Amino acid sequence: MPALTPNIENRVRKLAKPSNATQSLQPLLEAVSNAMFGIEDRYAEKIAKGRIDITVSKLSDPGDIEILIADDGIGLDADRYAAFCTIDTDFKKTRAARASAVCSGSMRLTTYRSTAPTF
């Protein structure tokens, strides 16, 4: 099979921006889901010890709202960082099947497209 060269900028440009408020929340839900996976990895059966903080600021300017999600999960070790840097990763494939969700790493492209200025 020939090697394919990715063009991330073009791929992001082709993604549709969210057309309604519900679609705009998808990156937030993905970030919370990632936090939950990190907490599960750190605490296992004692998952209730985990913590996720969501801070929303700059509400007075809809074009400049900031949302910060912080957790006390396992963090990014070398394997998780490598998966984070891979667009179509299988790192969370077994978990995605359990959660009936697709966690391929492509959501970060949608998140970027949702929040980035046109380029």
Image (spheres, rainbow, N blue to C red):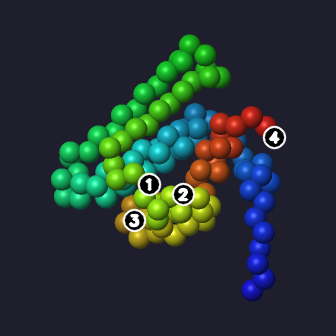
Which kind of residue does numbered mark 4 sit on? Phe
For marks 3 and 2 on the same chain, the one whose residue lies earlier in the sequence = 2
How many other residues sit within 10 Å of disc 2, few (<14), some (14-19) or many (≥20)?
A: some
Front label number (4 vs 3):
4
Give the residue pinned by disc 4. 119
Identify the secondary structure beneath mark 1: loop
**Residue 99 placement, left or right of 50:** right
Question: Farthest left residue?
Answer: 46
* Residue 15: image tag: none
In the rendered structure, are the residues bearing label 2 and label 1 in contact, judged by CB atoms less than 8 Å apart?
A: yes
Residue 14 location, x and y as percent? 77, 52
Residue 104 lies, with reference to residue 48, above or below; the image says below
Give the residue pinned by disc 2. 84
Spatial distance from mark 3 to mark 2, Cα to Cα?
15 Å
The residue at the point 41 percent across, 70 percent down is 94
For marks 4 and 1 on the same chain, the one whose residue lies earlier in the sequence = 1
The residue at the point 43 percent across, 58 percent down is 77
Identify the secondary structure beneath mark 3: helix
Give the residue pinned by disc 3. 95
Front label number (1 vs 3):
1
Which kind of residue does numbered mark 2 sit on? Phe
